[in-house]
Image (cartoon, rainbow, N blue to C red):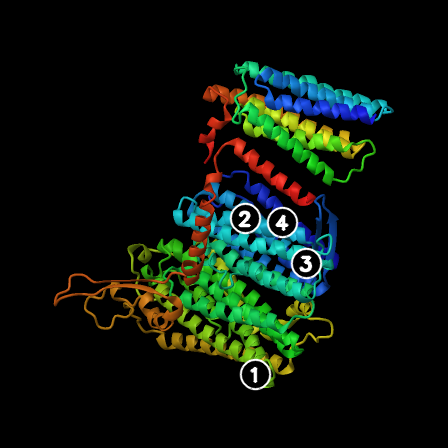
Amino acid sequence: MASLINALSMLLILTNFRLLGASRLGSCIQTVAIQAVLLGLLPVLANPQMPVRAMLVLAGMTFVKAVVLPTLVRRSAREVQVRGEIEPLIGFTLSLLAGVGMLGVGIAASRRMALSAQYASPLLVAVAIFTILTGIFLIVARKKAITQVLGYLVMENGIYSFGMAYAVHETFLVEMGILLDVWALVFIMGIAIHDIHSAFDHIDTDRLSTLKE
Amino acid sequence: MVLSSMFLFLASLFILAAGAALSLIPVSGKGGGHGSILAAAGSGLAAFSAILSLFGGGWDRSWPWSIPMGSIHIGMDGLSAFFVVPIAAISSLAAVYGRGYLKEEGDGRRASGSWFFYNILILSMLLVVCARSGLLFLVAWELMSLSSFFLVMFHREKEEVVRAGLTYLVATHLGTALLLVMFLLLDRGGMEFSRFGLEGGSAAVVFVLAVAGFGTKAGLIPMHVWLPEAHPAAPSHVSAVMSGVMIKTGIYGILRVLTFLGPPLPWWGWLLLLTGAVSGILGVLFALAQHDLKRLLAYHSVENIGIITLGLGSGILGLSFGSTAIAVLGLGGGLLHVVNHAVFKSLLFMGAGSVAHAAGTLKIDRMGGLLRRMPMTGGTFLAGSAAISGLPPLNGFVSEFLIFCAGFTAVVSRGPLLPAGAVAIASLALIGGLASACFTKAFGIIFLGEPRTQRVSGSRESSKAMVVPMVILAGLCMVLGLAAPWLFPFLAPALSALLPEGFAVELPGWAAESLQGVAGLGGVLIFLVLVLVLFRAFLLKGRGVRRSDTWGCGYLAPNPRMQYTASSYAWPTVNMFRMFLRPVRVVEDPEGFLPASAALKSHTPDVFLEGFYVPLFLWVRRAASLLRWMHQGQTHYYVLYIALTALVFLAWRLW
């Protein structure tokens, strides 16, 4: 089992790097969906004797994260007719290098944390921290409001895997709470992006600084 | 008895909450609907419940609260009840007065909104003095600060009102910040008052925080700067409540914290004594130099808070040196002065409000001759002035007399407390003299002489709603002064909450006797005045009385501008103390043999505001502007700041 979990963790790392390096919005959304699927598989692999109810909850959450939210994001992107390119504030090469640094921070931090869950690997903690940092990085270093939404989704994925490394059953509880937040966030962002677009004719958040006091 | 006291108290809280809710429904009437009636009724009921509890014993009740460390734990012991009585009674009278006052302001919508905050203010003040858990206390404290802030901002279209309101808001929150730290230091789990307790070094820290934090609300120098700004800006019934009772919650706070800290150290008493003396003397000096009536009264609040603190300080010194007589006299005098000041200060602020409406200004030097036009306001203002100056047979004298007694006991004992007694006596005497000077100025210029403006000469007495509360308060000044020897049973429960077990809570026999003597002399004095009045009426019977200008002095064409002004009356004293007051005087001397023009301007800014707080906050602003580059207005950067902060904390926890 541990080797499977490690393999999944490696895949998660790769998705993060793809997020950092992707130049197309479509592939970014796709990667977020893949990440959600991977995270959905993780607890099943770790604990095959999972009760059916937990299974159902997990399936529902994965469906929301892998299908519903990406569809919503994709649709609002289409509605406001953003061009397909990601507009980075920090270049893709530099982003990938920063990714390496963040992975390093994650590994260093995971070594410092004492683990309690029976199936968690130190690698999973490192990946969790890396994913959270990647999400924040996407929020900070990308221009469009839509990429910021994606950043929040990625960050949520990171928090979820972090919770999984530490708790067994409560993790779903925490997850559902956060998922609700992100769900609301995606909706609000969708509406807000639409409104910002119609008001300003663009959704570049770095040009919204006129709103400051 | 106990149960009914609690029931009545809870009912009064409910009525006040209902009053606040009802005030939100817009009403067409000018005075602002039913909010004022419910405020008056609710606070009257609260006063009654506290009196019941003073005689029937305290109560304590707790309800769970779904907030971490929170429980709705309220109780009424002697100390709480003693503060509830003036808070509720004055609020009730001020609500009646305010109804008339706001009617004259003539903005029903705004008045209605202000009654919402008025009800909340009373509710929160009652909760502050009855809270038994730290969180509830802080929540009530904050509610009190915010609701009074909104009340101050009644005339928010005026720039100086906004400025005053913001000064108050900043000051009160700086104070609350100190209190927050203090409660965290005191906390021993659950934030329950009953479990608070500290000894040694941290007790000293807590005490200093309490004096600074609560002192800000009370208006002790040098934390008083918000008082002279906020009180003139607020509507008069609000000033009456804020100055009369709200600032006393600061005094309550200091006393309540003292009960957590075990036996007091001598330097605590010295700290209170000296702060009180400085507040008292500087407060009255600044009051003397003011030209604005309500500003003058605000500085007198600083002075009276000083007197209260002076009394408490000598009482605590008595406690720490084991002298029952000094402890009882000092603490008792301080506590009694809380009530007395509440009575006469709210009376004076109400009088100031009537005068302001009649004269259309608060500038003392533009009034004059109002006594003939507003006899009730003038008469009650005179009673308040005499009381605040500490003259017998009115109530101000009694409490100051008790503090004097504490001072003399200390001096006569020739023990280590001799210097403390000397300080108390000397500063009280100086304060009393200066206060008399200040109020002869205020009363003389406002009410005597001739009107200085057209508007003043056409002014009339205020409405009944405004006059009746003032008459009641003036009567209370008299009654509290004459009934002083029998007031001690009201004080005793509060005192026994403050004094440790084993201290006998009773007045020394000689002090009780001299109080009776004072009361008796007061009675004789009043009798003599009555006889003289009757004698005058008898002599004047059947004779014509000719009315003439005051200060006629044989001028052929006297003119109101020839009258003595308040500024010139006060100048010799102000000049004598110019070292502390730093008055600014701009003189344009008359020139030549037939001078065409000459001018004199004087004003006295607050030394602490101009010399300390303004530079301090300018410095803070300069320091803060160094960080302006961080404020980019872009979401990216703000998320980055949050992320970096989180990372720093992560690293800090891990390494």
Mark 1 — residue? B411
Residues marked 3 and 2 touching at CB (< 8 Å): no
| C-alpha separation, residue under disc 4 versus residue under disc 2 | 12 Å
- Which mark's residue is nearer the viewer, 4 or 2? 4
3 and 4 marks on the same chain: yes
Q: Secondary structure at mark 1?
A: helix
Q: Residue type at mark 2: give it.
A: Ser
Q: Secondary structure at mark 3?
A: helix
Q: Residue type at mark 3: give it.
A: Leu
| C-alpha separation, residue under disc 2 versus residue under disc 1 | 45 Å
Q: Residue type at mark 4: give it.
A: Val
Mark 3 — residue? B186
Q: In this orientation, which residue lies closer to the viewer: B485 or B651? A: B651
Q: In this orientation, which residue lies closer to the viewer: A155 or B564? A: A155
Q: Chain of mark 4?
A: B
Q: In this orientation, which residue lies closer to the viewer: B652 or A67? A: B652
Q: Chain of mark 1?
A: B
Instruction: Kindly identify which numbered label has been placed on residue B375.
Output: none
Measured as percent of width and height from the top left, residue B337 is found at 56, 68
Instruction: Kindly identify which numbered label has been placed on residue B139.
Output: 4
Image quadrant where one finds the N terminus of chain A:
top right
- Which mark's residue is nearer the viewer, 2 or 1? 1
Residues marked 4 and 1 touching at CB (< 8 Å): no
Q: Residue type at mark 1: give it.
A: Val
Q: Earlier in the sequence, mark 1 or mark 3?
A: 3
